[in-house]
Image: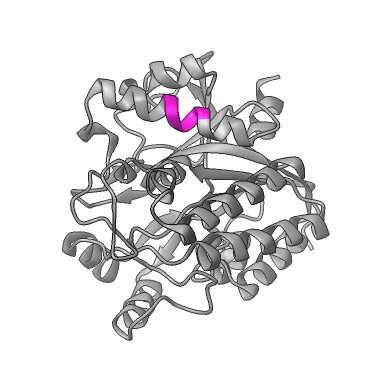
Amino acid sequence: MATTDSRLILSTDYELFFHRSGSVHKCLLEPGERLLEFTARHGMQMTFFVDAGMLRCFDRHAAQHRELAADVSAVREQLRRISAAGHELGLHVHPHWEDTRLVDGAWDFSDTRYRLDRFSDDEVADIFASNFELLQDLSDTPVVSYRAGGFCIEPFERIAPHLERLGVTIDSSVVPGARLNDAAKGFDFSRLPDTAHWNFDDSPSRPATGGRFCEVAITPLRVGHFYFWGRLVDRLSGGQRGQQFGDGLSKALGKPEVLRRLLGRSRVSELSMDDAKAPLLGHALAAGPSRRTWHVMGHPKLLSGRSLDHLAAFVDAAGIGATQSVAAYAENVRA
């Protein structure tokens, strides 16, 4: 076991899949219960970044679909219990839900806008105000943190006034060193140093001492191309890797990014408790034995019993002394 008293920030993106959405029960409710049980057993607090636009879309269609109405009620009840248990509810915005339709009982994402920069200023203002109001109604504490859908935080200056107006001054969308080469949902944090947190004003890519916003970065992990070859084999064989709880399927990446992952030496990814990446938690500890702050993220839909076992082993091996939500960590470092 590590001899240092390390800190762990734990966060998860509470959402469905963006391709074949999967069911609410398998992607949200059942793994959400597993997370509640796991964190209670280990005395952990964490942040659930809730895709509030998803819930708004559910509301728009629930009146005509009895099963969806029951799902909406169950999700709200679970989120209230999550908040009552002392966990943070953070704002997570995937704007494609603004255009999503329910067709023959399935969510149709075929003609949707993935990034906020494809929406008008008035549309962006409405998305943030309405999503925030919905989430705040479910939370016992003020909603103060944000994670961009797909890490697509830029251009931040377009959303900064809306976040600040709502009192949301903490962001957690950055994986230092990571880059995604994809026209629809790409991002580039390749020039940012591996730092646990920093302040900024106009962009998390431009740290500023005394800035209005605080970035709580996700811990990066360098992954070799053999890992991605394994993922490709799993994808071609007809499903996701391992024994994940969720029953949906993510949208495939574009060809340039796939080739970069398969043919490059390595790439930076996020440190994750998801089923496919949780076995790498031990590698991260070996690669960064002197690290004092770890931020592990994940998704309920991508968790598994195995991945939670890997997370528990990592917590023990890293000598974690405290597990915090994103907001609790930011409050401590700002003090």
* Foreground of the two, 59 or 108: 59
Q: Is residue 97 left or right of residue 32?
A: left
Q: Kindly tell me whether residue 182 is visible in this rendering.
A: yes
Q: Is residue 130 magenta?
A: yes
> What secondary structure predominates along the stretch shown in magenta?
helix
Please indicate whether residue 124 sits to the left or right of residue 287 in the image.
left
Q: Is residue 272 visible?
A: no
The quarter of the picture where the C terminus appears is top right
Q: Residue at x 44, y 77 (%)?
A: 241
Residue range of the region highlighted in magenta in the rendering: 129-133
Depth order, front residue of 64/25: 64
The verdict on residue 50 being magenta is no
Quadrant (top left/top right/bottom left/bottom right) for the N terminus: bottom right
Residue in the image at 38% along x and 63% along y: 21
- Identity of the residue drawn at 33% across and 40% down: 95
- Give the image location of residue 24, x and y in percent: 50, 61
The correct choice, above or below, for 230 with respect to 251 in the image is below
**Residue name at image x 43 percent, y 41 percent:** 56
Q: Where does the image place residue 202, in percent across and percent down from the top left?
A: 37, 19
Residue 239 spot, x, y in % from top left: 37, 79
